[in-house]
Image: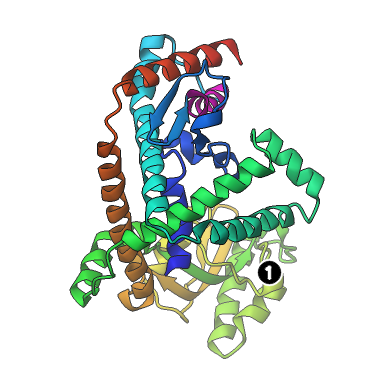
């Protein structure tokens, strides 16, 4: 289950978590936001930081991702509008970063004495994975780190803190409570139409006779009349045991004639004219049955219904494992949120509001100026 959970945990705890702004950030971009060391934070944001115990959060960690976002989105017309729109997201980011800083410090205190050696080994493994991601090209990997504002040392420290924080919070999570059958059924009923809906579907074979493509030898017979008589004759042959698909290959003018007139499964509402009439007729017959000749402008159609399905949902038995996984995920996410809120509340920072105001101003200036 941890394989399912920990990648999401990393997104919850280490990513900024600011709704629509952060959704577009890739994993590599998230790495732009390492835990800054108090003793050597960068001066690039005017030196303004939040100090959380032995950790610091620099303004530039907040400013950079938002500035990048507003380069590609519509800019607010005024600072006041911008502030009202962005401040709630920014407050969430800062609160998450405070929680992360508190989390790391608590994790460090609780871990064993030889944790540094273990983290060093684990971080080196992550570095190797990162290089493998560039097919072993060390220079390209290093250039990518530079673009993220990091070097190998800062990347290694970032990985150490990520690993340590994940390990610590996993240990804080409550043991899995039993998931009862009633829990599963309740969740299934709540989510089945959103996650497990199966739309109506049809599949059929079609003999599509198009009168304008017929050669009529009887001068007293129109192409339309000839098409109708041909269709009636084909239905007689089918009723006598002739294969519908083989007849479609010979007599159909439709685009699926080489496939024996077999259409791919389609949703009834997606059928375009003149074939939309088939959706209505399919409601009146059962799979295996054929229709009488259907006259529509430019066509005489014969349909054999192969299969049909009304709007429904996947049965509970087919999705039980998914529901169980979702329940476990939601329980753990709730526990993580509670831990994060508790950690954030423990850090009463007097300059938090001023820090957020500073970041808002810089983001707005950068987005307007195109920096």
Q: Residue at 44% of width from left, 13% of height from top?
A: 361
Q: Is residue 75 above or below residue 104?
A: above
**Residue at the extreme bottom:** 241
Q: Position of residue 219 (x, y in %)?
A: 71, 61
Instruction: Name the side, left or right, on which 236 lies relative to 144.
Output: left
Say if residue 311 shows up in the picture.
Answer: no
Q: Position of residue 6 (x, y in %)?
A: 45, 59
Colour style of the rendered protein structure = rainbow
Q: Residue at 61% of width from left, 65% of height from top?
A: 208
Q: Position of residue 359 (x, y in %)?
A: 44, 19
Image: magenta residue range: 59-71
| Secondary element type, mark 1 | helix
Q: Is residue 215 above or below residue 352?
A: below
Rendered-image quadrant of the C terminus: top right
Q: Is residue 355 above or below residue 172?
A: above
Q: How many marks?
A: 1
Rendered-image quadrant of the N terminus: bottom left
* Residue at image mark 1: 257
Q: Toward which corner of the image does residue 325 lie, by quadrant?
A: bottom left
Q: Nearer the viewer, residue 231 or 74?
A: 74
**Residue at the extreme left:** 182
Q: Position of residue 237 (x, y in %)?
A: 59, 84
Q: Nearer the viewer, residue 305 or 209?
A: 305
Q: Nearer the viewer, residue 96 or 49?
A: 49
Q: Residue at 72% of width from left, 75% of height from top?
A: 250
Q: Residue at 53% of width from left, 67% of height from top?
A: 265
Say if residue 64 shows up in the picture.
Answer: yes
The crowd level at tag 1 (other Cα within 10 Å; few <14, some 14-19, many 20+) is many
Instruction: Name the side, left or right, on which 191 lies relative to 28.
Output: left
Dominant SS type (magenta):
helix
Q: Toward which corner of the image does residue 143 lie, by quadrant?
A: top right
């Amino acid at each position: 289950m941890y394989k399912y959970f920990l990648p999401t945990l990393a997104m919850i705890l280490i990513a900024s978590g600011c709704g629509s702004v952060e959704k577009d950030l890739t994993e590599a971009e998230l790495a732009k936001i390492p835990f800054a060391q108090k003793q050597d934070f960068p001066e690039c944001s005017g030196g303004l930081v939040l100090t959380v115990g032995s950790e610091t959060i620099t303004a530039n960690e907040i400013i950079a991702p938002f500035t990048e976002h507003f380069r590609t989105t519509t800019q607010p017309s005024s600072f006041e509008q911008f502030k009202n729109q962005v401040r709630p997201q920014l407050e969430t980011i800062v609160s998450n970063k405070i929680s992360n800083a508190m989390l790391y410090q608590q994790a460090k205190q609780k871990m064993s004495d030889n944790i540094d050696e273990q983290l060093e080994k684990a971080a080196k493994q992550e570095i190797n994975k990162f290089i493998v991601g560039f097919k072993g090209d060390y220079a390209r990997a290093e250039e990518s780190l530079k673009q993220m504002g990091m070097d190998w040392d800062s990347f290694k420290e970032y990985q150490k803190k990520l690993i340590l924080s994940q390990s610590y919070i996993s240990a804080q999570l409550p043991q899995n409570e039993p998931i009862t059958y009633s829990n599963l059924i309740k969740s299934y009923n709540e989510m089945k139409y959103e996650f497990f809906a199966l739309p109506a579907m049809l599949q059929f074979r079609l003999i599509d006779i198009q009168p304008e493509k017929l050669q009529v030898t009887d001068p007293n017979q129109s192409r339309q009349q000839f098409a109708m008589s041909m269709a009636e004759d084909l239905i007689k042959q089918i009723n006598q045991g002739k294969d519908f698909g083989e007849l479609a290959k010979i007599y159909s003018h439709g685009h699926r004639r080489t496939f024996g007139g077999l259409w791919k499964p389609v949703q009834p509402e997606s059928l375009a004219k003149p074939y939309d009439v088939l959706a209505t007729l399919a409601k009146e017959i059962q799979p295996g049955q054929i229709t009488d000749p259907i006259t529509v402008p430019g066509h005489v159609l014969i349909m054999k219904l192969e299969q049909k399905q009304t709007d429904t949902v996947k049965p509970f038995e087919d999705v039980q494992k998914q529901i169980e996984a979702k329940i476990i995920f939601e329980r753990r996410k709730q526990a993580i949120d509670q831990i994060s809120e508790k950690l954030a509340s423990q850090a009463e920072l007097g300059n938090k509001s001023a820090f957020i105001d500073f970041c808002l101003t810089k983001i707005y200036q950068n987005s307007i100026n195109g920096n």
